[in-house]
Structure formats: C-alpha cells, structure tokens
Amino acid sequence: MLKLLYVLLACCISMNLVAQNFKVSTIERTRILVDSTYDAQIPEEAVDFLAPYKHVVDSMMEPVVGHVARSMKVYRPESPLSNLMADILMWASEAYGEKPDMAVYNMGGIRANLTKGEVTLGNVVDMAPFENKICFLTLSGQHLIELFQDIAQTKGEGLSKGVRMVMTKNKQLVSVTIKGKEIDTNGSYRIATIDYLAHGNDHLYAFKKKTDFVAPSDASNNTRELIANYFRAMEAKGIVVDSNVEGRVTVIK
C-alpha cells in the first residue's frame, strides 16, 4: 500500500511538472456508441460481480406503470414526446392547487425515447434521470413574449396543449397564441415548468424575470415521479397514452 502511495505521488508530481511546461493547443473528441457490439465478449467475472446488484435494480425498474400507443421520440421544433412531457406538467399541476396557462419542458431534459407498448419505471428514469422538480411561476405578458423569443432561438421546446407558436427558420418569433388568444402584454400568465429552467437555464433567459415563484423541494416533486404517477393514473383508467405532433410549434420560411 505504501509503495502504491509513492507511485501515485510521483505521478501527481510528474503531471504538475508537465502542466508547468506545456499548454493545451487543441482538443478533439469522438463519440463512442455503446451498444450490443460490446456484448460479444462479456467478462464472466464482471457478470458474477454485478449479479446481486442487477437483481435489486431490475426489481425496482421492471414494474410496468403504463402503456403508450406508439413509439415516441424527442426532436425539434416539436415532437410527440416533448408534447407529452409538457402536458404531464399541466396534469400534475392540479395536485398543487395550480391552474397554469401553459407548461414548458425542455428538449434537453428528455434523455430517452419511448417504445410502443409497456412503459416501465426504468423507462421513466431513462427519460428523466435528473433531479428536476416541477415548479410554478408568473410572467408578465411582455416577458412571456420574450420567453417565446428565447424558445425560437433554441429552435423549439416542449409546449403544452393549447399553445400555437410560429417561428422562422432563422429562429425569429412570428406569432404565438395561448388557447386561441394572443398574449396580452399588460396581462400576467402562470406557467408550469421545471426548476432548472425557472432559473434561466438552457437559454430561456426570460424565466429570470419570474414572480410568485413556487418550487416544492421534496423528492416526490421530481419530474420522474410525476411522470410515473401520470402513467399509473392513466393505466388505472384503462387509457393507453398517446401523443402526436399537432402544430404547437410551426416553422415557416
């Protein structure tokens, strides 16, 4: 053990000397796709080591929470899965005594697609692996227009049912309506989103101008918990969840 410590110390000293004499000139990266190719030769020792942990994880992740009518992907400017995630935020809002005018869910926060058929808890965790939590905030009409301008710059985000946004290919906002009405610049609008976005992240800077911010901090408010609860509620009603692209975000020349 002492010898190992000496070796580690020597490596640290060597790296420090290198850092003093050299500067980074370029950085290159490549993407390595981890798929079934790596299953050709699976080390038995690793399988044996992971076996007891795999059993525990599988028992937690394999339970079915619902079903989807079609395979759903996430892509800009609008996708079935991003629409669904925004709609789930609207659905979940009732439990908090909130009645938001709309919801926003970022494309980058959705990390996996759904395949037609069963939806397991593991699928939900794959989609929403972060510690993002639902929250509620108010924007003035003018600041809401600024939010949609931000969304146009990102080329589209997940928007709830009833929102109709038109943007150009060069990312300029053309028009937006909520439930068939234009935004009243003198009005105020309640929005459901996630706490990560509420602080202006993912280039949605207008959220920084929020008021009446409500952000439950308990883990039960995590988006993956709400998503799983939504699927369970639909399953209990015998509803197979479906979602489509329906013109919530339209891109014109």
Image (cartoon, grey):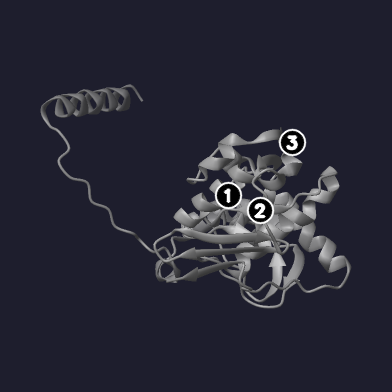
Quadrant where the N terminus sits is top left
Between discs 1 and 3, the one toward the N terminus? 1
Question: Nearer the viewer's eye, disc 1 or disc 3?
Answer: 1
Disc sitting over residue 183 in the figure: 2
Which residue is located at x 22 percent, y 46 percent? 27
Mark 1–mark 3 Cα distance, whole angstroms, equals: 26 Å
Nearest to viewer (mark 3 / mark 2): 2
- Total marks placed: 3
SS category of the residue bearing label 2 = loop
Q: Are marks 2 and 1 in contact (CB under 8 Å)?
A: yes
Q: Which mark is residue 239?
A: none
Q: Return the residue at label 3.
A: 216
Q: Is residue 191 left or right of residue 108?
A: right
Q: Amino acid at mark 2?
A: Ile
Measured as percent of width and height from the top left, residue 67 is found at 74, 71
The numbered mark, 3 or 2, whose residue comes first in the sequence reads 2
Q: Which residue is mark 1?
A: 145
Q: Quadrant of residue 119?
A: bottom right
